[in-house]
Every structure is written in structure tokens, then in C-alpha cells.
Image (cartoon, rainbow, N blue to C red):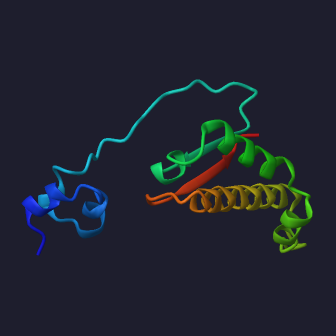
Amino acid sequence: MIRPDSVLEKQTRPDSASHIGDKYLKPVVISKPDISFTNRTSEDECLILASDGLWDVLSNEMACDVARRCLLEGNSSTNAKVLDNIRETQTTEESLNEQSQSRCSIAAALLTRLALGRRSADNISVIVIDLK
């Protein structure tokens, strides 16, 4: 049993409420996300949606650089192995869409591994969206 007084003493694990759902942990957990609005421009290449587990250990610039490289280098040998699984029966549009999705998945996985390599102490969730 988790007591409210023990939770307040051990604030090193504030993510406990999301795992347990205990109402006593709610005062420790902030459930209001950081939200910002930004107008898109024609230069925008991708959108990275990620939890604090990524942003606590990677700068915006580094995360964007990694995602950009994954999206632009879709034909590199590493990415080519993933993209080789595309079926020949797809139309060109379907094929391009699947290639973009695969590159986004590769970028998200790489960002996650970078955060883990930098010993992120938080949960890590990453989604990369190709805007081109």
C-alpha cells in the first residue's frame, strides 16, 4: 500500500501515478502538458513529438539534426534494408508513403536509442512526422 506521506517523501519517482493510478499520487504528478502553437512554413521538414525522456537529454538542435538526416538519407545502406520490404504490388504513391513512414520509424528509434545512451531517467516516447 502506498501512503500519501511516503509519496511526498520520495518525489524521485513522480511517474508512479501513471503506472498505478492511485489517487493519492495525483498531488505529486503534473498532468498539464506543455503546449505551444507554431505556424508552419515551407521550410519545415519534420515534427518530433516526444516525452521528457528525450528532451531532458537531447537538445532541440540535435534531435532535429538526427531526424532530418534519417529522413533525407532514406537510401542509405542502413535504411535500405528496412525499405527493401516494400511490396512490388504497391502504387508509387503507396510506396513513397511507406518509405516515409519507415524513415520516420527509423528516426524515432534512433532518437530513443540516443536518449537511452545518454542515460535518460524518464520514460521515452518519440514520434517523428515527415512534413515534406
What residue appears at the point 56 percent right and 55 percent down from the top-left corner? 126
Vertical position of residue 2 compared to residue 97: above or below: below
Nearer to me, 3 or 24: 3
Q: Residue 44: percent from the left, percent from the top?
A: 71, 32
State the residue in front, 82 or 114.
114
Q: In which quarter of the image is the C terminus?
A: top right
Badge count = 0
Question: Is residue 24 placed above or below 41 in the rendered structure?
Answer: below
- Front residue of 120 and 78: 120
> Residue shown at 90%/72% (left/top)?
88
User: Can you tell which quarter of the image residue 39 is in?
Assistant: top right
Q: Position of residue 78 (x, y in %)?
A: 86, 66
Residue 115 horizontal side relative to residue 110, left or right: left
Q: Residue at x 92, y 65 (%)?
A: 77
Q: Looking at the rendering, in which quadrant would you find the N terminus?
A: bottom left
- At 66% from the left and 44% from the top, the residue drawn is 63
Compared with 84, 31 (above or below) is above
User: In the drawing, does residue 88 fall left or right of residue 19?
Assistant: right
Residue 19, image x, y percentages: 30, 68
| 64 and 62: which is toward the camera | 62
Q: Is residue 126 left or right of residue 99?
A: left
Quadrant in the picture for residue 94: bottom right
